Image: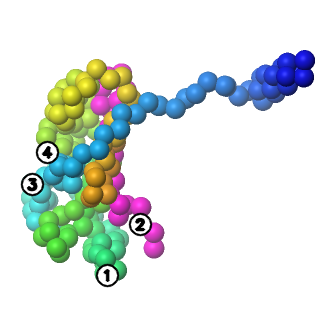
Amino acid sequence: MKNFRLTLLAICLLCSINLSAKSIAQDTLHLVREDQFLRYPLGTSNSFRSFENANKKLISSTGDKVKAYQNGSTAPTKMFALQKSYVRFYPDKNTKKLELINSIILGNEIPLQNGVTVGMDRATFFKQMNIPDGNTSANTVEITSKTAGISHFYQFNDNKLSSIKIFSKLFYQKD
């Protein structure tokens, strides 16, 4: 009888404060891979100027510095944006390439090097990304690198790719 009262009390409490008891968490397909695409999803460039020349429609702006090296030294960053999307890089003195810090792509202004763009359908995305299980109904596909500290998040709405978010470990850096 006591358990019944507690259950009834809990139900009344939930109803009175207008909370829903159903889960709203999105389902996510998690993948761990190690390939060059994860590190260089927008291709490789040796300098800010070479990236600008290859992507003339993007508007560039300088950004803060990041502590990109083990010894604590910093590197300048540059952001490239157009409409609802942007990417941010720093020039790595070790690799001699632009390294991605973070990117949020909400439109088809910035395609990835493998042809993935916002707006493409789920089946085409899985084929382009070489993901074997194209039948999944996950709303989010998360691909994380084993060693480079990079995570890609691909969000779907109505079986269409709606956003691409890419973060490296430098994005989470605090001053």
**Quadrant of the frame with the C terminus:** bottom left
Residue that mark 2 sits on: 173
Q: Which mark is residue 54?
A: 3
Gap in angstroms between the C-alphas marked 1 and 2: 15 Å
Please identify, in this view, whether the residue under mark 1 or under mark 2 is nearer the observer: 1
- Sooner in the amino-acid sequence: mark 3 or mark 4: 3
**Badge 3 amino acid:** Ala
Q: Pointer 1 and pointer 2: residues touching (CB < 8 Å)? A: no
Q: Which of 156 and 34 is in front in this view?
A: 34
Q: Position of residue 135 (x, y in %)?
A: 28, 20
**Quadrant of the frame with the N terminus:** top right
Gap in angstroms between the C-alphas marked 1 and 4: 32 Å
Q: Is residue 9 visible?
A: no
Q: Residue 40 carries which label?
A: none
Which element is circle 4 on? loop
Image height of 67 relative to 22, above or below:
below
Q: Position of residue 60 (x, y in %)?
A: 23, 61
Identify the magenta region. Answer: 154-175
Q: Dividing the picture into quarters, in which one does residue 66 lie?
A: bottom left
Q: Does the magenta stretch include residue 161?
A: yes
Residue that mark 4 sits on: 113
Q: Residues within 10 Å of mark 2 (few under 14, many from 20)?
A: few
**Badge 1 amino acid:** Asn
Q: How many labels does the image show?
A: 4
- Sooner in the amino-acid sequence: mark 4 or mark 2: 4
